[in-house]
Amino acid sequence: MSKTNVISYLNDQPFGRLPILGVSPSVEGGRWPAKAVVGEVVPFAATVFREGHDSLGVELLLTAPSGKQSVYRMTPGDPGTDRWLTSAWLQEKGQYRFQIRAFGDDYDTWHHNATVKIAVGIDEDLMMLEGIALFNRGATEKGRSAQSAKLFLTLAEELANQKRPAKDRLAIAEADVVLKAVAAEPIRSLITLSDEWVIDCERERAGVGAWYEFFPRSEGAVFDAKTKTWKSGNFKTAALRLPAVKAMGFNILYMPPIHPIGVAYRKGPNNTLQAGPQDPGSPWAIGSADGGHDKIHPDLGTEADFKAFVKTATDLGIEIALDLALQASPDHPWVKSHPEWFTTRADGTIAYAENPPKKYQDIYPINFDNDPQGIYFEVLRVVNHWISFGVKIFRVDNPHTKPVAFWEWLIAEVNREFGDVVFLAEAFTRPAMMHALGKAGFQQSYTYYTWRNTKHELETYLTELSQHTADFFRPNFWVSTPDILTQYLQFGGPAAHKIRAAIAATASPSWGMYAGYELCESVARPGAEEHIDSEKYEYRPRDWAAAEKSGRSIAGYITKLNQIRAAHPAIRQLRNIDFHHTDDSAILAYSKRIAAEHTVANQEDVILVVANVDPHAVRETTVHLDLAKLGLPYGSSFEVTDLITNQVFTWSSDNYVRLDAFLEPVHIFKIGKLV
């Protein structure tokens, strides 16, 4: 085998000349693309090493969707790990491609050897000769800039000047101008490239947003006490609520299904089987004589009314998210036209939905295996129908009860034609399924945040989301839903509602709340972890103005949280959370930092959150800060400004904190100047 063939052979082997392993971001070895959104700072890492003691250089070669390639020098991680790290700010929508380039850093190898030997007077002439050969070779390397080549030739001449001591000649070769030149354009050997990896970078709303949920039928609903009848709210009355949603800082409005609701087995108040003539039924029991998933409930208005509603929201800077619930009421047109799309039991009846002990007699699940082609293309038609109305976001109900392969197909088909469409998975289920849905294409997912309330639980879960699953799983922290009212909120009062909202809004790039949360609605149905008189089964108009006037509303607090999110890019990142030690088991402290070069304003942004997660008490403790994680010098003192109260304090590495759950349970600090 010739020399050329040997080198070619080595480069084609899995290891290559220089081993490059454990590249990230990657998902299942590149089986699926990693995820990112425009404006996200993405960390890159690889395990790279070589035999012997010669120096190694590692670079990230990142190609943007536009074709522009950038080179980022990677730096060593923790000693002994052979991990090399860097980060890049992704600013283009589309598919990024990247490789890791490893090489022998010949300048650093020579410089280390020369420094050690010349210091003790060993091999001085040999070190100069090797330096001359190094810089002469470097000057002639392909792609070398003219400025760098000229500098290297000059250095070779200086090293050859035997009239000067070797120490002086070495000093010339390690001047700042030389160090900058070899950092920018290293003298490389044994160049080895990794496989190519991809990152799908989607629009910002695919991973960053503030969501608000309301039922349009409740907004403007009126009860006539004389006739004991209800008049449903509609898109016109619901549009009147949009300015208040915008004023609170929300940029996505999610509505439960807006389609006709079945009559058969309609549920009454609190999920009872006795529905009266005035009970509107669950919006998730989709389908009646008025139509199915591509129709609008007559009480809500016409298609023209919906288009006007979408336009009103768009003009306010709010996107509309529709519910995609793939199920049917017994009255849905599909039941007659396509009975094969459902599961027929041994007694000839169609199986209704069950989640023991819960039963949903008003809903038929779809069987995706009887006629997959028919079902797949019908759902695609429905999604495309609503996209034609200007809808670009779909909140998908219970996606974990449908085949993952179906979602992989559907999302790919939709995004192939409409790249801005976003799917949120409402999946409270086993981690393997939730993660699979993210890999299959869901841009976001509901999470276990709803049930993570203690300091330990939150630290553990936030670490998982930011460090271990961020390449494929984008969290959306919902503090409440129409279905879920945790004991923490049932018994925690306004303090609990503030705490949960503050952590959700600052720890996750996407968060959401269901209407009524700002009123601290927290009365539970006995024996259940859900609201009494659930809006799922009845009209629920609210007197927002009266609540604000009486002081029962925390809308002002919610508004402040969203204002802080909008003003601070560090908060809108997923992967940058760091935790700090506190002496109290109920005081949670974490920071989020983004470098100046990764912001539009070219200003570093550092936020520190200190939260009392005990909604029933005053807590006092010492917060011990890792100043390096805040980008601050060891032993420094600095200003912190509480963005909730506007109070300014001087802090250092160890700080006393007192947080009264009944007053202000959370500090959200902006790190300021050194003092």
Image (tube, helix red, strand yellow):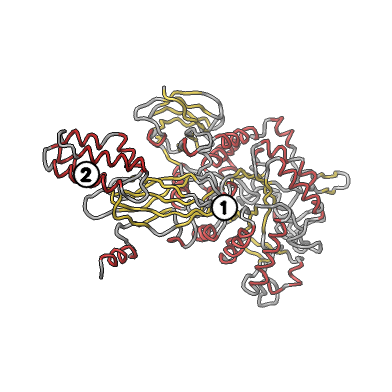
Where is residue 636? Give x, y as percent.
Answer: 37, 26
Residue 265 is left or right of residue 482, and the answer is right
In the depicted view, which residue is nearer to us: 82 or 657? 82
Where is residue 18? Give x, y as percent.
Answer: 30, 57
Where is residue 512? Give x, y as percent.
Answer: 61, 45
> In this picture, is 26 found above or below 341?
above
In the depicted view, which residue is nearer to us: 125 or 335? 125
Q: Which mark is residue 338?
A: none
Q: Amino acid at mark 2?
A: Ile
Please give the residue where the numbered disc 2 appears in the rendered image. 132
Q: Secondary structure at mark 1?
A: strand
In the depicted view, which residue is nearer to us: 590 or 190? 190
Q: Quadrant of residue 519?
A: top right
Please give the residue where the numbered disc 1 appears in the rendered image. 444
Distance in Å between CA atoms under marks 2 and 1: 56 Å
Q: Amino acid at mark 1?
A: Gln
For label 2, count other residues whose C-alpha is less than 10 Å away and answer few (under 14), some (14-19) or many (20+): many
